[in-house]
Amino acid sequence: MRARPAAWVLFLAALFGCLQLANVTGRDTPDSRNYLSYALALGGADKREAAGRSIAYLCASRGETASREHSVDVRRFRAPDPGPGVRAECRRHYERTVGGRLDAGQTSGWTAPFMGERFMRIFEVRPGYPLLLLPFVTLFGVTWGLWAAGVCVAAAGGALVFLLLRTVGVPVAAALTGQALYYVLPTGTTAMRPMAEGTMTALTLSALLGCALVLRGRRAGAVVALSLALLFTVKHSQALFLAVCLAAACALIGVHRRRSGRPVGDDVRTLLKVTAGAAAGTVLLARLLHYPSESDSLQDLLTDHFLRPDRERPWQEFVRLEVNFWVEWLRRQLLAPLFLVLVGAGAFGALRRWPAFGALLLGAGATGLLSTAAHPDIAIDRLLVMVWLVPVVGLPLLLAPSPGAAPPDPPVALRAPAQFPAPLKGARGTAQRGFGGAAPE
């Protein structure tokens, strides 16, 4: 490739952004209205204005979606377009329900009262994504602001995949393949939707990049800590899951090194201290700030967002639902096993190329399984988005030339250094292999 790597990264990001012009609206979820009203309130709008603008965006999106679906409905496409009616009915419904709550005095917090106070409290403790939306909706308005924010979040995620793969030591072409995979797999689709998962995915990749740098011998523990801290502001449960999973991966690496007669190494000790400290800090800070607990989350799941009375035996019902969910989920995956095949191939590629990093990648991917297990709703697939990072990063590692076949490209993403870093040395002066540390040369 004659062009600089940075040019290719920007080209792929720009191409992805141009393709997203096909769907400027129609990506919203029920969570989008809460995040949007939060961002508008942060920008100075009062509750009624924030609610009105959020309702207008939501209902316009639903009306356009109804029109699109109607135009290709083989039985109904000859009938009048239902879009305007759907939009009008949507606005009447939300103006009545939200207006009623505002009139009743439900005006606390930053979000508009689309639901009861108990449910809205879940979003009140997630200021990170609304803060990210604020400059976009202020400069470009609601519709184009949400679209532009999605493009930037998705583009950043793809660029982080490129940086991560170059740090691991794969060639430029393979790293660009990883960036492209991020855009075309569900990671890119999810990142474009106006909800927090895209930002969470980007921060997870940032934490993984910090881990890879630490394994390379760089002093990048602060990158991991900062990523987890920012993730706490976006969704504190995800920050806890990621910190715990990365700490568990570090512990596994350390145990494997000791059993193999090798020193644990300062790299793993650093990562274990940072991630374990972040996990403990997340739990403590969430308690001090009186964030919604796991019991609140459980009742939210089982009572349809607190619209029904609390369950007397929620844990028994949860266990039953959990078992039923995973049996049905596995049945559906075996029916169309592409997801399982891609994840398996990505895991194999990462563990084969650099087992220590592969363990950390699998730990990050496992947070998707934990999120899904905490909210086993078969109709929601976005919670598994973190698992897709395993094929996004692992497949380029699997397809890249073997380290013994040709010298790898420099690990720095956007400009080539003079020399690729040598393998890390153990405390006894021997190169650490496998779970022992640096990527093979």
Image: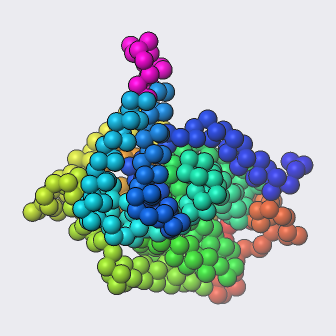
Q: Say which quarter of the image contains residue 373.
A: bottom left
Residue 439 at what x, y percent from top left?
A: 67, 67
Q: At x 73% / y 47%, what residue is drawn?
A: 14
285 vs 221, left or right, is left
Residue 251 visible in the shown view: no
Give percent across and percent down for residue 297.
27, 64
Residue at the spot x=22%, y=47% of the render?
Answer: 324
| Location of residue 265 in the rendering, given as x and y in whole percent from the top left corner | 59, 83
Residue farthest to the front, as pictured? 103
Q: Main secondary structure of the magenta part?
A: loop
345 in magenta: no
Residue 70 forms part of the magenta stretch: yes
Q: How many marks?
A: 0
Residue 219 in view here: yes
Q: Position of residue 95 (x, y in %)?
A: 34, 48
**Residue located farthest toward the bottom when viewing the structure as drawn:** 427
The residue closer to the viewer here, 264 or 274, is 274
Residue at the spot x=34%, y=36% of the render? 89
Q: Quadrant of the C terminus?
A: bottom right
Left or right: residue 166 compared with residue 288 = right
Q: Residue furthest left?
A: 312
Colouring scheme, one of rainbow, by chain, secondary structure, one colour: rainbow
Up the image or down, 213 lies above or below 338; here it is: below
Say if 60 sits above or below 200 in the image: above
- Magenta segment: 69-83
Q: Nearer the viewer, residue 247 or 384?
A: 384
Which residue shows up at 37% across the image and 42% down it?
91
